[in-house]
Amino acid sequence: MSAELRAIDCDVHPTVPDLKALLPYVDPFWRDQVEERGIPSLESISYPPNAPITARPDWRSKNGQAAVDVTQLSGQVFDRWRTSLAICNCLYGVQLVFSEDMARAFTRALNDWIVKQWLDRDPRLRASIVVPMQNIEYAVDEIERCAQDRRFVQILVLAMQETPLGRRHYWPVYAAAERHGLPIGIHAGSNYRNPVTSLGWPSYYIEDYASQSQGFQSQVASLICEGVFAKYPGLKVVLIESGVTWLPGFLWRFSKFWRGLRTEVPWVDRSPAEIVRDHIRLTVQPLDAPTASGDVERAIDHLRSDDILLFASDFPHWQFDGDDTMPAGIPAALHRKILVDNPLATYHRLSGATHTDGCRLFE
Amino acid sequence: MNVEVKQPVRVHNSRVGLVDCDIHPKITVDQLRPFLSNHWWGYLQTYGLRPRHGFVKGYPFPKMTPQAARRDAWPPTGGLPASDLDFMRAQHLDHYGIDHGIMNPLSPTGQGDQNPEFSAALTTAANECQLEHWTRREPRLRSSIVVPYENAEASRAEIRRRASNREFAQVFLLSRTSEALGRRRYWPIYEAAVEAGLPVGIHVFGYSGNPMTNTGWPSFYVEEMTEHATSSQALVTSLIMEGVFERYRDLKIVLIESGFAWLPALGWRLDKHWKRLREEVPHLTKAPSEYIREHFWVSTQPMEESEQPEHVVDVMRWIGFDRILFASDYPHWDFDDPVLALPPSLNEEQRRKIYSDNARALYRLG
């Protein structure tokens, strides 16, 4: 990474230390419910707390958690890696809750907690709005409530939902996103309404994590086939922690079937590969890459776009060792775009905010 | 999709001796009848096929052509596409100079039926039909052992019943099984396949009973077709992570009609995360991509078409030119023409491997 570039980190994960941390932000009814029903936690099994991938060993505190407060995250991301801005994507499992009312209460609480405990404590932090997709009206309400705060730069949903994200009952969320200029960030994770593979529940956690990239493929196919981008031409979608290299092969297959079957979806009036380049971005960590660096460059070339990758460390998930935040083998000529230009082009609220906050992107 | 308009006037001079690894003969219900007991024939008449979806006739996602067939594949003598051997010979085997064709019969063969005993009876009958109506009449063709895969004991018995008959070239499964194919309940199938020295071909389709994606049911046929790749990714992951290849070291898996461009990226993904998570799967003795390299073959159709032609050749190199098998998918609408399907930049040796040598070695065709 060249020394003068100060990256924009599009994926860092504040950890909710426990459910008690959110109780100041819910009304007394839900405080009582948590107490009286003995609700222990809403952490998602997508990231078992002690699993190697959930936090790098040297970032874990004595109790095993990482990134539970702004000091550690800022120290690593801003001080050590000299990042200029970072987007907080909180993965606490409020999207998994079955009661729509409970989901609404704890989603609101989570967003308020992010504001008070993170955004208010470091002006270099931004965040995604966590939304209760269990109920689309509630999701839109939450977007409208949080979008007033310009430090929220994106709407966050999980890669595996109850129904594919293109389905039309979701469209009010995309209307709100377009209205506010907020990309939809689809992050690895499931609300566990469906088995994590189309062949049922696998035996091992590594299969659960590997299956995330299947969810991303299905979401891209659904968003395009249902006509989301035809209806909302200003909408952008960011695929976060997807693994990246599954995309070209998926698009070759999908675009070929689209050519043969396009009469079924006449609103898809150009190749899915083109639509993806115009509307979809991917964060670069993790990069599921071959071991030979020449092959990494080939795999990146298969994306056919210099604009499509966004820098992310995925802190504190254990995706790399040391300080090699940029995956090896990505051509140096692309670094500036990945680190700075592409994030700014994707998240319009970052540029506005950098002016008002006086953050300098280049030194 | 690669059907040339003026195809009939073109002259074919095959230089390599083609092997087509995916031909779909249509076995009809009437052909099954002599091979079914009165009980199962009556059952079929009364309840029909129930392969884990909701429709009595047709499919959850309607195909875009009747029988998903090429419009020109309906035999002039009447009957369904690929139900008439003479017409298949003229339109496909002779026309392209095909030396050998591996037959993979689909519905109504009873695979994946909810009733495991009925599934066993139908698959046995389907295997008899392949011999009676196809391979005994056309030596270029080979049958696949259709097995009732949700009933592994019956599958093992069926494989053992057919093992010594060289008219059968492989054990035949569909990709959308009720659980991922690495799960222990399917291991008797692999045991019998290895015992018989036969590869296991896994052809896309079937219905698992689970939503077709891990984010729920899609809406469109174009999604169903695209999603075969994701189901195949899950089954490859399962076969590796469950340790199937540690138990059955000689097992050979052929992925049919699932495409292949996703396979190297899946290997990279599994390798990357296995490095962190390997303690969970201590029975693996090597990186996941090494199991892929050693145990998997892929068929070409539907041939992936990258926007820049050399990109798909990169992927073929990553998989290995010794692991890729030509397939046409005759008589289906997305048929790949043997003359036109492969990237033009492949050299003569690469073409010979894909069109011929790899399949001859794998299927013992000589």
Image (tube, coloured by chain):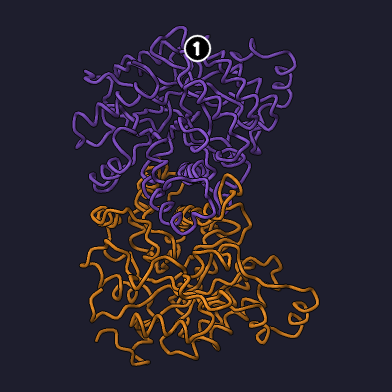
Chain colours: A orange, B purple
Q: Quadrant of the N terminus of chain A?
A: bottom left
Residue B349 in view in this figure: yes
Q: As rendered, which of B136 and A171 lies closer to the eye?
A: B136
Q: How many marks?
A: 1
Residue B221 in view in this figure: no
Tell me the quarter of the picture where residue A331 sits: bottom left
**SS for tag 1?**
loop
Residue ranking furthest to the top? B137
Q: Which residue is mark 1?
A: B165
Q: Relative to B297, is B364 above or below?
A: above
Q: Chain of mark 1?
A: B
Residue at 21% over, 18% down: B13
Q: Quadrant of the C terminus of chain A?
A: bottom left
Residue ranking furthest to the right? A36
Q: Relative to B342, is A337 above or below?
A: below
Q: Relative to A251, is B55 above or below?
A: above
Residue B56, image x and y in percent? 66, 32
Q: As rendered, which of A31 and A45 lies closer to the eye?
A: A45
For badge 1, the amino acid type reads: Asn
Q: As rendered, which of B273 and A278 lies closer to the eye?
A: B273
Residue A360, image x and y in percent? 30, 88
Q: Residues within 10 Å of mark 1 (few under 14, many from 20)?
A: few
Left or right of B26 on screen, residue A139: right
Residue at 79% over, 73% down: A37
Residue B54, image x and y in percent? 66, 39
Left or right of B86 on screen, residue A104: right
Residue at 62% over, 39% down: B178
Residue B82, image x and y in percent? 46, 19
Left or right of A262 on screen, residue A333: left
Residue at 63% over, 29% down: B152
